[in-house]
Image (cartoon, helix red, strand yellow):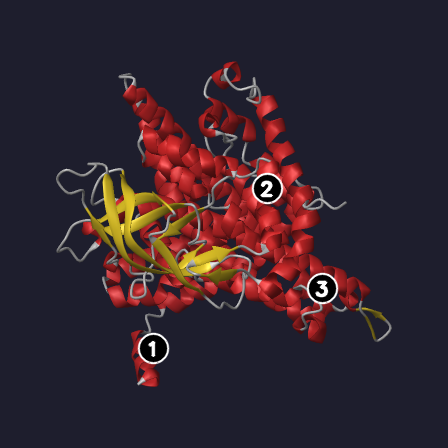
């Protein structure tokens, strides 16, 4: 039987690279859970062994029944009748298998039935799920809902809602977008009616319409709603949690290009009872931002999983397909595409797992600090400073990862079809499904354009400065000097570009070149990550040489383009579009 964890050693390499023992020490604090839970680890070594066991279990499950069911689920999809969704029977089997394997609460606390594991472990599992069936990730990956309730909800809400999510007895959904509020969540209109005199003071009621809701038929729903009557912006929005009941009506399932196993719902709330999560008026500015960051990491893992599946299928086909007397993988035009696919997947995985580590490095200590506050203990000022630093880094690396990997996944799937030719276009193969499934990744949970905007502000404000400065000052092994010099020469080009754009003080021009600045930052940062790997891994050294050479060309071009200051080109765009 196959195993997606064992047949993709780069996953284990990246998990080992992020320092799982250090993350385990953070997660487990003093390892005191072992006194209460039989399956809790006694030390870091045991915790890391548990992490790899979970990945191995998920890898075997995904390579087996999950992958085998994917094509039929894609063909037949889910159904809706009388306002209720019925999962395809094989989707139900998939969820039952994940529930039995105890993989539905990987990142949730043990106190509520979860496994209490770091984000990077969840990321690895979601990548493998997505390689087997990208649509299933949208169901098993919604553990972010439980994480959000755990972070901001009351103790009663945690007991009521997280337990079902962790056990797999309940699925969840983020209920955010509306017919006229896609990316512009500030304009959400679904109304939250506060408790009236004589009613339960904790129960609000929701009324309105939501659209494009992934798994909107879920059992536990986090809903963004307008709690402040008369407001029109994000300051009037709050976050609510509710259970699916007869007041929620699924009007239809969207007829989509891909991810057919994941129901996307158009739904109405008809005086639905709900509970306020956290504080009023902070639903968008704090809670949705936290929720979306987790969701974006999930989509990034989904994109890598799809890309890995597309690469594997294209590579296998190229080895077997004989043309002009030899396998097509022997032709430079083909092996150049495959090499490019492989490099970009590994660059994306390196970026995502590093982003996951950074998220763990601020979220876990934040939870510890909040617990200390509740106990009346003094706040560790050094810890608070470290949390702030990692939080700022996460605010840049999360959108960078989502942007890069979703665009990369589309490119890899495109090339996969090209390598397979007419066969890749046919439904006899999985490649056309990968191509369709990849397309949503750079749209939902924030389009690529929004990710660029999100990352740009952090780049311009210097969030990445220390990383780049430390890189320039670091002495790598002598054998790497030629490629290191090329990589280090890219850094001043980025800062010259940033200084130029800031000096112009022209917001339209900044927006126009935003993608190019973000691409420059990505090329340099991913070069740094590859060079760090090259110190300990010969194969990564080969990748670093190729990656840095090509990254340098891209950085140099973008630098020259931006500094040419061709504002007239913007006017030409406008002329062309008129």
- Where residue 77 appears, as percent x and y from the top left, is 56, 62
**Between marks 1 and 3 in the image, the one whose residue lies nearer the viewer:** 3
User: Which residue is at 50% across, 16% downward?
Assistant: 36
Q: CA distance from mark 1 to mark 3?
A: 37 Å
Q: Which mark is residue 569?
A: 1
Examine the rendered structure and indicate whether residue 165 appears above or below residue 415: above
Q: Is residue 289 left or right of residue 471?
A: left
Please rate how many residues cluster around mark 3, counting C-alpha atoms within 10 Å: few if below 14, some from 14 to 19, many from 20. some
| Residue 475 visible to an observer of this rendering | no
Local SS, label 1: helix
Q: Are marks 3 and 2 in contact (CB under 8 Å)?
A: no
Q: Nearer the viewer, residue 552 or 428?
A: 428
Q: Nearer the viewer, residue 370 or 336?
A: 370
Closer to the chain start, of discs 1 and 3, is 3
Q: Is disc 2 placed on a helix, strand or loop?
A: helix
Residue 128 vs residue 276: left or right?
Answer: right
Q: Report the side of 500 relative to 10 (left or right).
A: left
According to the picture, the residue beneath numbered tag 2 turns out to be 98
**Residue on which disc 3 sits:** 335
Q: Does 431 sit left or right of 452 as displayed?
A: right
Give how far across and how far down residue 208 sits, in percent: 27, 58
Q: Quadrant of the C terminus?
A: bottom left
Q: Secondary structure at mark 3?
A: helix
How far apart in space, not on screen, are marks 1 and 2 (Cα)?
Answer: 53 Å
């Amino acid at each position: 039987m196959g195993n997606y964890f064992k047949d993709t050693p780069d996953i284990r390499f990246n998990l080992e690279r992020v320092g799982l023992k250090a993350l385990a020490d953070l997660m487990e604090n003093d390892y005191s859970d072992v006194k209460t839970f039989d399956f809790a680890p006694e030390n870091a070594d045991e915790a890391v062994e548990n992490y790899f066991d979970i990945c191995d279990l998920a890898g075997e499950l995904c390579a087996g029944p999950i992958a085998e069911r994917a094509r039929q689920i894609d063909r037949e999809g889910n159904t809706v009748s009388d306002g209720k969704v019925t999962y395809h029977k094989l989707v139900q089997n998939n969820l039952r298998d994940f529930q039995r394997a105890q993989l539905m609460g990987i990142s949730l606390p043990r106190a509520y039935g979860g496994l209490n594991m770091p984000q990077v472990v969840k990321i690895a599992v979601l990548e493998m799920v997505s390689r087997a069936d990208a649509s299933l990730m949208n169901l098993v990956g919604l553990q972010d809902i439980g994480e959000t309730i755990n972070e901001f909800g009351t103790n009663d809400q945690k007991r009521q809602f997280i337990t079902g999510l962790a056990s797999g007895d309940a699925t969840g959904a983020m209920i955010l977008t509306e017919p006229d509020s896609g990316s512009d969540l500030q304009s959400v209109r679904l109304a939250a009616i506060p408790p009236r005199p004589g009613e339960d003071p904790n129960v609000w009621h929701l009324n309105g319409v939501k659209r494009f809701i992934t798994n909107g038929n879920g059992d536990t729903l986090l809903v963004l709603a307008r709690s402040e009557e008369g407001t029109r912006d994000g300051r009037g929005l709050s976050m609510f949690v509710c259970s699916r009941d007869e007041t929620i009506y699924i009007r239809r399932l969207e007829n989509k290009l891909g991810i057919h196993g994941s129901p996307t719902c158009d739904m109405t709330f008809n005086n639905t009872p709900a509970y306020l999560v956290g504080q009023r008026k902070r639903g968008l500015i704090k809670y949705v931002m936290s929720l979306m960051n987790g969701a974006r990491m999930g989509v990034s893992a989904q994109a890598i999983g799809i890309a890995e599946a597309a690469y594997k299928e294209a590579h296998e086909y190229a080895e077997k397909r004989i043309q002009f007397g030899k396998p097509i993988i022997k032709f430079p035009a083909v092996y150049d595409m495959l090499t490019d696919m492989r490099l970009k997947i590994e660059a994306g995985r390196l970026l995502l797992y590093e982003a996951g580590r950074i998220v763990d490095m601020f979220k876990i200590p934040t939870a510890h600090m909040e617990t200390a506050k509740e106990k009346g203990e003094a706040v560790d000022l050094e810890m608070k400073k470290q949390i702030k630093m990692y939080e700022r880094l996460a605010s840049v690396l999360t959108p960078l990862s989502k942007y890069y990997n979703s665009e990369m996944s589309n490119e890899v799937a495109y090339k996969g079809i090209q390598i397979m030719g007419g066969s890749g276009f046919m439904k006899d193969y999985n490649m056309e499904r990968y191509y369709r499934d990849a397309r949503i990744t750079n749209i939902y949970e924030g389009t690529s354009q929004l990710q660029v905007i999100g990352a740009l502000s952090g780049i311009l404000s210097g969030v990445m400065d220390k990383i780049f400065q430390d890189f320039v000052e670091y002495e790598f092994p002598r054998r790497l000097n030629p490629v290191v010099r090329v990589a280090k020469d890219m850094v001043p080009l980025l800062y010259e570009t940033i200084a130029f754009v800031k000096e112009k003080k022209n917001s339209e021009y900044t927006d126009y070149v935003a993608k190019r600045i973000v691409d420059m930052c990505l090329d340099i940062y991913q070069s740094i990550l590859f060079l760090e790997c090259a110190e300990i891994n010969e194969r990564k050294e080969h990748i670093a040489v190729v990656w840095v050479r090509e990254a340098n060309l891209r950085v140099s071009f973008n630098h020259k383009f931006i500094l040419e200051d061709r504002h007239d080109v913007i006017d030409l765009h406008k002329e062309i579009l008129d």
